[in-house]
Amino acid sequence: MTDINLTIHAGEAVCVVGASGSGKSTLLGLLAGLDQPSMGSVCLGGQDIGKMDEDGRAGIRGDMLGFVFQSFQLLPTFNALENIMLPMELAGFEGIEDRAAQLLHRVGLGHRGHHLPAQLSGGEQQRVAIARAFATEPALLLADEPTGNLDSKTGRQIIDMLFDLNAESGTTLILVTHDESLASRCNRRIHLQDGRIVNQGSKQRTG
């Protein structure tokens, strides 16, 4: 990536668009501290994560970030409830089983808590992934093609859930997507091409 200069404010919903290979997933990796820039800095909540060691970056990810991946990334030997409980357990939350059950109910899967990922449909797995991402009440949620593997009806349901939960928690959203219906719900669109920002514009979010 080259000459990226980007500020995202608390509570914003920002989509990142561009052709395959334009740098969208790389940008998410930099923002999450999973990749390190060769030049410049990445600051989260006023902290330069490039100056931290890996333990420090892992700590700030645990404290501030939630992730939703296109491939779900659920642990196959954990049931839905346990997948949601895990990040809360790692973060030292109390009452994690009750909170996980509430989140499962919130995404319409209160009756599926004891099912393994392999026993869930793609849309159900993505709902579990969204509930897990919001479990620790992150300040920032990063989502990489959250509707990419879903049919249009399920994709719309996932989009509604993302923004409903965002509205309730005030979480900042940064979403990589090819889905125009998802992009249209965001406050701002950042268009990448060959690792550069070629356009970014703000608008009033709809829906």
Image (tube, rainbow, N blue to C red):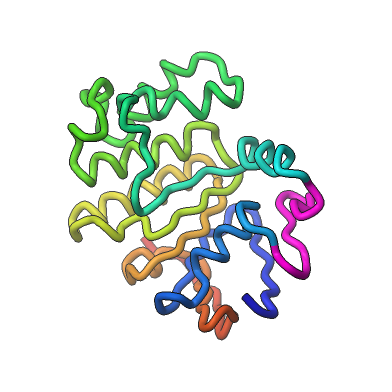
Which portion, as a residue range, is magenta? 37-52
Is 74 positioned to the left or the right of 48 in the image? left
Residue 40 occupies quadrant: bottom right
Q: Is residue 120 above or below residue 7?
A: above
38 relative position to 31: left or right: right
Residue depicted at 28% across the width and 40% down the height: 125
The answer to if 44 sits in the magenta stretch is yes
Percent coordinates x, y for residue 88 in the rendering: 52, 25
Q: Is residue 41 above or below residue 173?
A: below
Give the residue displayed 43% in from the left and 35% down from the top.
Answer: 132
Q: Is residue 61 above or below residue 32?
A: above
Quarter of the figure that contains the C terminus: bottom left
User: Which residue is found at the position 44% from the left and 77% from the top?
Assistant: 18
Residue 166 at what x, y percent from top left?
A: 47, 47
Q: How many marks?
A: 0
User: In the displayed structure, does residue 19 sit left or right of residue 80?
Assistant: right
User: Which quadrant holds the N terminus?
Assistant: bottom right
Q: Nearer the viewer, residue 68 or 15?
A: 68
Image quadrant assignment for residue 19? bottom left
